[in-house]
Every structure is written in C-alpha cells, then in structure tokens.
Amino acid sequence: MLYENHTANLLGLEDAIVKKVWNDAEDQHIEIELPRRKHACPCCGAETDRVHDYRMQRIKDSPSFGRNVYLHLRKRRYVCGSCGKRFYEQNKFLPRYHRMTSRKNARIIDDFRDTVSASYIARKHNISASTALRYFNLVNYSCKKLPEVLSIDEFKGNAGGEKYQTILTDAKNKKIMDILPNRKNATLIHYFCQFKDRKDVKYVIMDMNPHFREIAATCFPKATIVIDRFHVTRQVIWALERVRKEVQKHLSDAWRKYCKRSKMLLNKPPEKLTDEERQKLRIILGLSTRLEEAYHLKNSFLDLMHSSSSREAKERLHAWVIQAEASHLPEFYECTRAIHNWGKYILNAFDVKYTNGFTEGCNNKTKVLKRVCYGVRNFHRFRNRILHCAT
C-alpha cells in the first residue's frame, strides 16, 4: 500500500489509484482508476454509487523521464436508481470529450511562450502541429487601457496579407500592449479612438515616421511626442558609412582591402580605442580629408547627444547643423534635413527618460520567432503568439 501511494504521488493526479505500470520502447503506460463514490445524477440530481459498467479510455499525459506517457483509465459508468440515467464518473484531470489531460493542454499552451515553432512543440508532446495550434488558438489577449508612456513602432511581419504590422508598448513598465494588423493611418486612428482614456497618455515615443506623428497629433493632442535618440544617431552613423564607401571606391586595391573592415573602428567611441586601433584609425583617416571630416562630425554629434537638457542640446544641435552644412558633404544633408523637420521632437528626448529601446528589443524577438516558424500568415495567431511570448 505504501508503494502504491508513492506511485500515485509521483503521477500527480488527485485521487488516482495506480493499478499497473508497464513500458515499451518509447512509451510508458499507466493503468489507473478513481475510487468509487457517490455522484449526483445530471438528470434528476439524485445521488447514486451504483455502477452500470466499465470501459477503458486511453489518455495522453505529459511526457515523463524521456518517455511519452499514456494513462489507461478504467472508467465507471453509473446508473441512477431514480430515473435510470446512465452517466460517466467525474474527474478533475480530463475535460469532457478530451483525450489529453488538462495539465498536458496547459503545458502545450505554456510552451508557446518560447521562441520555437509549433512543430517543435508538437514533437515534444507527441501530437500533431495542427493539434498544438488548435489548443493555442484558445489563447486570446486584449488591450483594456492605454499606458501613460506609449511607444509605437512598425515591424515587418508579413501576416494577414499585410507586409508591415504595428507594435504598441508601455515604455514605462516595459510591457507589450497590442499588435495591430497594419500601419495605415485609418486603422491606427480607428483603434485609438475606441479608448476613452486617450487623454491619460502623456508621452508618445516613436521614430521619425511622419504617419505616426500625424496619428499622435490627431489622437493624443495633449501628449508630448518624443523621437527616440537612437534613430537620430543612426542617421549620422549611416551618413559616415556612405562617406566611407564612397572614399573606398577611389582607393587602390591594397588600400581598399585595408579599409574594408574599418567600420568598427570608425563607429567605436574614441575613448574606448586601444593604442593599436588609434594608430590604424589615423592611417585610415589620413587617406581622405572627407572621411576625416565625416568622422569628426559623427563624434561631435555623439557628444552632443549626452547633453543634460533640451536647452543645452538645442544650442549644440544648432551649431552642429551649421557645421554639417558647411562641410559640403552631401551624405550628411539627409541628417540635417531630418533635424530641421524633427528638431522639436528630438529635443524632447533630452527631457524625457523614456526610449524605444524596449520596443526595438521586442521587434528583434519577433524576428526570431518569425524565422523559427518560417513565417506566420494568420495575423490573429501571430498577434497572440507575440503577446503570449511577452507575458
């Protein structure tokens, strides 16, 4: 009797009595039954413990010790003494009409939190991919209210017939709020207009997307629009890269090969360079005055991005724009034009501590998820999968 109790505890099913255990090549089989007790008749409500007959039901359970587990439940069918109704006994581990235990279903759904494909989860639980997805389709998330700090960005999802989807996150509490099916103005405005707490949004964090700026101005007129500093800095680094590539075209084969992999040196902060790297950088910058001037423009811009306030940053940013325009480097004209168009919102980033960093990290995780799944065409499933992985 002591051995049987330990076996039942190892099985982890409430009230289950283990009758027999046997193994084959890959599977473990456990025959169980429940203790006989009174049940209420579903028809008239009278209690009865009179057994009409038995049947064996094979149930899939969660894998254990590297083996697929099958439970063989010796299932009673009771008969009501009052109305003659026949019904099966009740248990807490197997939902009605199911052939898998509740805990197996829960573990299947929980495994969808990992960035793995549905076929991998199916193989792990010895089921088909369509069955795994059918259980995951029971999961659904909804956004009840908008956050105080709303971060908005787009990513390439290729789901639901749309190339791009939109992600909304809470930049303050680091939480994904929702995924929208596309990035169209009409879709986003209609979505935001459903919320009565739009006035509670104080900050809207975004990149330099004119569509998002228009949406923020329409739906959140009292909110402060903040352009993430990373996207501004990236524009300057890309300008330096364009200068480097243009300079390399006019070098000899030997020098071109020498400078080909210099991107890391040019982008690395000067204070973090080793003596050997500084020597190599001096050689590379000595090949072109244009490249040297672009390098100094990049460093001065990175330095001004560490300004303590928007007032200080405004003066330094104005001086940098004048310097960039006077350099006659056409590769930087796009940067100066972006600063002219977005300067007001860029300066807000020096007074607001929130960034799009969490949102960009979520987009990277989404790319990994999409890659391991070889794409997810169903947008509803794709949306719930992203939100499920984030919880």
Image (cartoon, helix red, strand yellow):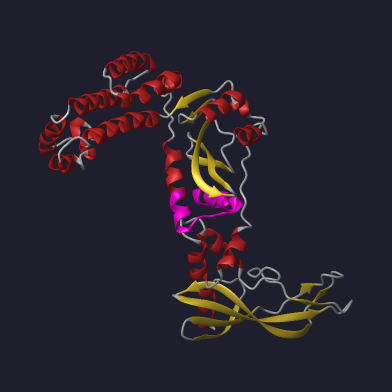
Using the image, determine if residue 97 lies above or below residue 242: below
Q: Residue at x 46, y 56 (%)?
A: 115
Using the image, determine if residue 63 lies above or below residue 363: below
Q: Is residue 209 left or right of residue 72?
A: left
Using the image, determine if residue 131 lies above or below residue 238: below
Q: Residue at x 44, y 75 (%)?
A: 66
For the N terminus, the quadrant is bottom right
Q: Nearer the viewer, residue 229 or 182?
A: 182
User: What's the magenta region?
Assistant: 367-391
Residue extending farthest right: 83
Tell me residue 343's x, y (percent): 42, 19
Q: Residue at x 59, y 25 (%)?
A: 220
Q: Is residue 249 left or right of residue 202?
A: left
Q: Nearer the viewer, residue 242 or 315?
A: 242
Question: In this orientation, does residue 154 appear?
Answer: yes
Q: How many marks?
A: 0
